[in-house]
Image: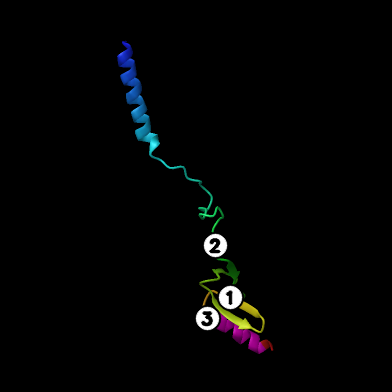
Amino acid sequence: MSPLRLIVIAILLYIGYRLLFGGRKKVNRGQAPKEPNGEFPTSDVLEEDPVCHTLVPRQQAVSWQDGDEVFYFCSQECCNTYIYQKGEQG
């Protein structure tokens, strides 16, 4: 084989490699994306419903305040059940 033919084959192999693998961006799998300041974004806190014990994101939960304490519920029905049960006890 002539040196020119080897160079052409090497260039074609390099172009093929770049077409297959060169356009991919590196992704950190299994980690949340970082914010521009380098910290991980804060996700919503999960709260446990005291009636049915399901975990509910705080922003989506129905909340009820009793004095200084705040309770989070998955639905208005669970909130009403808790208030009713608390009224019977006290």
Q: CA distance from mark 3 to mark 1?
A: 12 Å
Q: Secondary structure at mark 1?
A: strand
| Residue 85 is a magenta residue | yes
Relative to residue 42, is residue 18 drawn left or right?
left
Mark 3 and mark 1 lie on one chain; the one further toward the N terminus is 1
Q: What is the quadrant of the C terminus in the image?
A: bottom right
**Badge 2 vs badge 3, beta-carbon distance below 8 Å:** no
Q: Position of residue 38 (x, y in %)?
A: 55, 52
Question: Which residue is at 54% across, 50% downward?
Answer: 31
Residue type, label 2? Ser
Q: Secondary structure at mark 2?
A: loop
Residue reaching furthest right? 90
Q: Position of residue 74 (x, y in %)?
A: 53, 74
What range is drawn magenta here?
77-88
User: How would you classify the magenta stretch by its main secondary structure?
Assistant: helix
In the foreground, 1 or 79: 1
Residue type, label 3? Glu
| Residue 70 is a magenta residue | no
Dot 3 corresponds to which residue? 77
Q: CA distance from mark 2 to mark 3?
A: 26 Å
Mark drawn on residue 72 = 1
